[in-house]
Amino acid sequence: MKNVEIVCMLVVGLFLYTSSALAEEPSVELGKQLFNDSALGASTNVTSCGSCHPNGKGLEEAGYNPELAKMINRCIEAPLKGEPLDEDSEAMKSLMAYIKTLDK
């Protein structure tokens, strides 16, 4: 019985390691895709960040705001009528990275 338990623990450990190793890292490209995705935050309408800010218009200085994650979530909850993102999530970090590139 002990061998079965050990094998099960090894399989679970390997699965967790593989899953985390395969997880994508936050990226500007992913942030741009999410910015233009009307399903962001399980949105209940067809609005995306890009609907109100085509090509990032009006967000040129937003990347400097220390409350950027909170601003993003306010937009997801209000205009997009979606659920806020975890501030430590890959999606949030990617959106923030993309918005920081809009400074021109």
Image (spheres, helix red, strand yellow):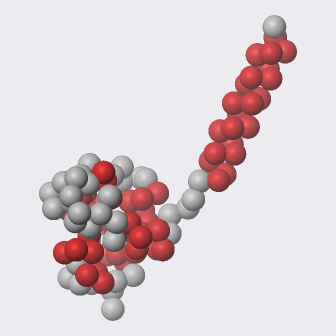
Q: Position of residue 95 (x, y in %)?
A: 38, 67
Question: In the figure, is residue 56 to the left or right of 9?
Answer: left
Q: Quadrant of residue 46?
A: bottom left
Q: Residue at x 38, y 66 (%)?
A: 34
Q: Position of residue 45 (x, y in %)?
A: 21, 58
Residue 70 visible in the picture: no
Is 6 drawn above or below residue 47 in the view shown? above
Q: Name the residue: 79% across, 20% down.
A: 6
Of the pair 80 and 17, the residue shown nearer to us: 80
Q: Give the quadrant of residue 17.
A: top right
> Whole-percent x and y of residue 24?
57, 59
Q: Is residue 52 left or right of residue 30?
A: left
Whether residue 9 sits left or right of residue 46 in the image: it is right
Decide if residue 40 is in sight here: yes
Q: How many marks?
A: 0
Extreme residue toward the top, this view: 1
